[in-house]
Amino acid sequence: MRGRFRVFGNAAIIATLFVVLFSYAMFQGGFVSWFLFFSFLPIFVYLLMFLFYPMKKWNVTREVTRPIIQAGDKIDVMLRINRNIPFPIYYCIVEEVFPVSLMKADSRTEKYRHMDHPEKRYVERKIKKVVFPGFKRSLALPYTIEQVPRGEHQLRGIRVKLSDIFGFVKREHLFNVSNELIAYPTIRPITMQEQYQNFEQGSVSSSSHHLMNTNVAIGVREYVPGDRFSRIDWKQTARRNNVMTKEFEQEKSTDILLILDSCHYEGMNALAFEAAVEVSLSLMNAFRKQDNQAGLLSIGAEAVYFPSEQNAGVQARINHFLARIQPNGERSFSISVKEEMKQIKAGQMAIVITTRMDDFFKQSMLQVKRRTKRVAVIFIQASDFISEAENHAVQQLRYADIGVQIMTEQQLVHNPIEVNIR
């Protein structure tokens, strides 16, 4: 409807100019007035042709170099316009129509310096290119999207505006060109200060301050080329007069479940939630490198569970899920986690990642602890946003032998992130 009004308005302008000049020539008479009228006729014909020029038949495409990236990366985009009729056009404005999801900037660790001002992340992205096509049939317009935020972004439209050389007639059309961009959460380097492991010969959990523990020796065997020199059993070697090496029982990795608080609440800090997503994916990646079985349970409006399976398919689904996830739901996390106890296996180690602690949080964690062998909580929030009630809840959890690590902007701005699971 708006486009039709614009066409009628442009046609009225052309008709008015024609009528004015024709009336002037008729009533004024003489060589000058008719010369002006006939001199305007080529311009009048051009304006009519420009008004009905088939702009909608242009072939407008968008090429994205890397549709799958990590948050904070940049993307190079190429807009191409091809037209069959080389109609002369004075100037053309090409504008990318960005979705709301791209109206944020991800500066990676730098964004956490303003964790107490999450609104500073929001930007107004505008890409406008002014070109002078003339008689050209094809145009190529490159541009770059900097600091792409986490998420699934849909680029759906390219707006093109045209004008004649005099500015009498203006044309505009929105071309529906769809491209999908996926920005996965940034995987941060993690320094694990403590790791819990089980061995097959016992049920008691042991802790170590090393990322990799030695296995449990269960016997000796003859040395074969390739065995580590440090594993030679010198006592047995001297006794048997043959080089003997220690034989180790295969170590059983810890089964870990990460529980991500994806519940929405009033006054939620969006940057703290971004950090929670990044820490969740980074921990999954760190545990996988240590050959630990780690699953993920996200609790929001719905609970989404990913089993602790070491295969590329599950990891790809986790990456895609964490790229799209946004806080949602009306119930608090403390209430929702009680209803999802069936997803928590007995004997697992649970690591809860949250941005809020309410009055029922302690009771929920105690209930989780009764089902699992150990519970740890990573509480992520800006230091200025942590209330006295939340500080009190942290102390109560620690008294109940539930490890709590508080992550603020002071920890998040540095690489690697130090994680204490005590």
Image (spheres, rainbow, N blue to C red):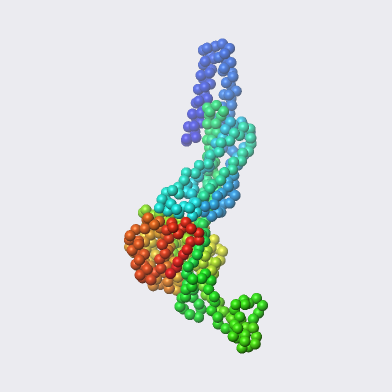
The vertical placement of 175 against 237, above or below, is: above
Dividing the image into 4 quarters, which one contains the C terminus?
bottom left
The vertical placement of 44 against 404, above or below, is: above
The vertical placement of 350 against 173, above or below, is: below
Image-based side of 273 in relation to 212, left or right: left
For image coordinates 48% across by 68% down, the residue present is 193
Q: Nearer the viewer, residue 365 or 192?
A: 192
Residue 412 x/y as whole percent: 46, 58
Residue 260 x/y as whole percent: 44, 62
For image coordinates 36% across by 70% down, the residue present is 400
Q: Nearer the viewer, residue 248 or 53?
A: 248
Residue 193: in sight, yes or no? Answer: yes
Residue 363 x/y as whole percent: 35, 67
Q: Nearer the viewer, residue 208 or 372?
A: 208
The vertical placement of 171 against 148, above or below, is: above
For image coordinates 52% across by 52% down, the residue present is 72
Q: Residue furthest right?
A: 225
Residue 326: in sight, yes or no? Answer: no
Q: Quadrant of residue 160?
A: top right
Labels in figure, total: 0
Q: Residue furthest bottom?
A: 239
Q: Nearer the viewer, residue 369 or 223?
A: 223
Q: Quadrant of residue 134?
A: top right
Image-based side of 325 in relation to 141, left or right: left
Residue 409 x/y as whole percent: 43, 56
For image coordinates 64% across by 83% down, the residue present is 243
